[in-house]
Image (cartoon, rainbow, N blue to C red):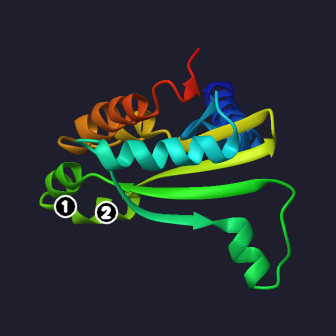
Amino acid sequence: MTVFILGIVCGVVGVGVLMVAFMPKMGRLFFVADQSRLPFEETINQIRERCKTSEHWVLQAEKDYNAAYIKSGRGEMSHRLVEFKLGNPDHSYRVNRVNPEVSTFMPAALAIVEYTPEKVLIYRKNTGIMGKMFNEPMRTIMGVEVPQQLDELLKGIIVKS
């Protein structure tokens, strides 16, 4: 019996050690990175234009981090970074009337990063995974609707594998 209990304890400790070791890498699961087909400025302009005509997404805010850091005296980064905050009134209403605490995940954000002129990436939250952690209606909204609608917004801009 002692060997059995010792085996259980060792197993639990082993799993714990593995989780701690891999946790920093697991954080990457919460983000989606897509390569843009377009140069940095054109990527930004295309997203702006698509938000103007989108039936789902409204451009609520835009931030040029490089300009903000230069203005605050922090200096310029080695890469260019612009972030868009995209709202969806339908999603927001459906979520906030049931679970207002989930508003901390809203609005959706896109980070457009130019590492080199040939390497422009668009990052976003992996709401497909996040949605699985909730009950309805968040499960469907975050897990299905948001990723599908953002894919549609970015169609033709990103390289999809």
- Residue in the picture at 23% in, 65% down: 100
Q: Quadrant of the N terminus?
A: top right
Would you say 41 lies left or right of 80 here? left
Expressed as whole percent of the image width and height from the top left, the position of residue 145 reads 28, 34
Taking the view exactly as shown, the residue that stands out farthest to the bottom is 72
Tell me the distance, in whole angstroms, between the alpha carbons under discs 1 and 2. 7 Å
Expressed as whole percent of the image width and height from the top left, the position of residue 119 reads 77, 35
Expressed as whole percent of the image width and height from the top left, the position of residue 76 reads 84, 68
> SS at mark 2?
helix
Q: Can you tell which mark lies on residue 103?
A: 2
In the rendered structure, are the residues bearing label 1 and label 2 in contact, judged by CB atoms less than 8 Å apart? yes
> SS at mark 1?
helix
Residue underneath mark 1: 96
Looking at the rendered structure, the kind of residue marked 1 is: Asn
Kindly tell me whether residue 13 is visible in this rendering: no
122 vs 16, nearest the viewer:
122
Q: Can you tell which mark lies on residue 76?
A: none
- Residue in the picture at 27% in, 51% down: 88
Would you say 1 lies left or right of 91 here? right
- Residue in the picture at 69% in, 38% down: 39
Residue 28 quadrant = top right
